[in-house]
Amino acid sequence: MWKGKLERAREYLLVMKTTAKRLAELEQEVKRLHSYDVPEFIALRVSEGLANYLTWLSSSVARHRK
């Protein structure tokens, strides 16, 4: 339902990975780029994971300074 009417539209699920530190920045960018007034934006907290992977994730989303 959207604005009191049943809507039908093709939608796609996009999964993006980031860290808690960068979540607000990602949210702002999604809102800026998305065509919907209210895009679905949810965050799932990672409580456990492969240490090497979590280290890679953290370093891959860090700001790289020149």
Image (cartoon, rainbow, N blue to C red):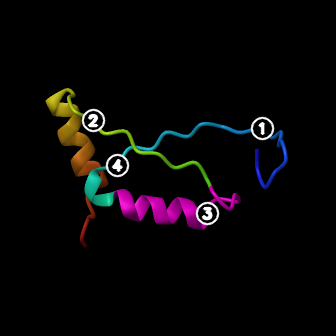
* Image quadrant where residue 26 sits: bottom left
Question: Which structural element holds mark 1?
Answer: loop
2 sits left or right of 46 in the view: right
Name the residue located 57 percent from the left edge and 63 percent from the top edge: 31
Magenta stretch: dominant secondary structure: helix
Q: Label 2: few (<14), some or many (≥20) within 10 Å?
A: few
Q: Name the residue under label 4.
A: 18
Q: Distance between the residues labelled 4 and 3?
A: 17 Å
- Looking at the image, tell me whether mark 2 or mark 4 is earlier in sequence order: 4
- Front residue (pair 66, 5): 5
Residue 62 versus residue 14: which sits nearer the camera? 14
Relative depth, front residue between 24 and 17: 24
Q: What label does residue 33 carry, if any?
A: 3
The residue carrying mark 2 is 46
Task: Give how far apart the Cα atoms at labels 2 and 3 are.
Answer: 26 Å
Give the mark, 2 or 3, whose residue is nearer the N terminus: 3
Q: Given the current orientation, which residue lies at the most extreme left position? A: 51
Question: In the drawing, what numbered circle is on residue 10?
Answer: 1
Q: Which amino acid does label 2 sit on?
A: Val
Residue that appears at 37% across and 39% down:
44
